[in-house]
Amino acid sequence: MVAVRLQPKEETTIISCGSCGTSQEISSRGKEPIDIYNEFVDRFNSGQTGAPQAETATSGVQA
């Protein structure tokens, strides 16, 4: 689950992951909600959100 808090006066959105707790403040100027969500997912997948390493590193698969 993802939590989204719109801040229209500041033209920003705070979006956070309900599973790992990482969050980001993203500019919402001129963007649709799906664009903000996609930007968060892109940042998360590229490691730009500061996602907890313990959560992402434990996949249960051993090399």
Image (spheres, rainbow, N blue to C red):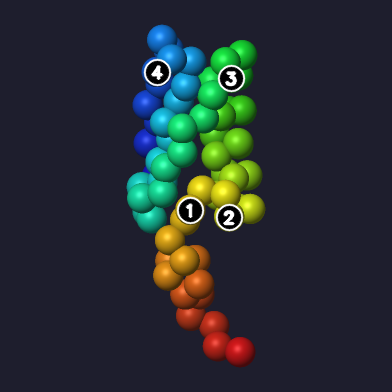
Which of the two marks, 4 or 3, is nearer to us in this view? 4
* Numbered mark located on residue 10 in the image: none
For label 2, the residue is 47
Which type of secondary structure does the marked residue at label 3 adopt? loop
Q: Are marks 2 and 4 in contact (CB under 8 Å)?
A: no
In space, the residues marked 3 and 1 are separated at their CA atoms by: 24 Å
Q: Nearer the viewer, residue 50 or 6?
A: 50
Outermost top residue = 9
Give residue 7's mark.
4
Q: Nearer the viewer, residue 59 or 54?
A: 54
Mark 4 Cα-neighbour bin, 10 Å: few <14, some 14–19, many ≥20: few
Task: From the viewer's perspective, tell me whether residue 34 is left or right of residue 8.
Answer: right
Above or below 62: residue 10: above
Q: CA distance from mark 1 to mark 4?
A: 22 Å
Q: Nearer the viewer, mark 3 or mark 2?
A: 2
Q: Is residue 9 above or below residue 21?
A: above
Residue 21: give x, y in percent of width and height: 36, 50
Q: Is residue 2 visible?
A: no
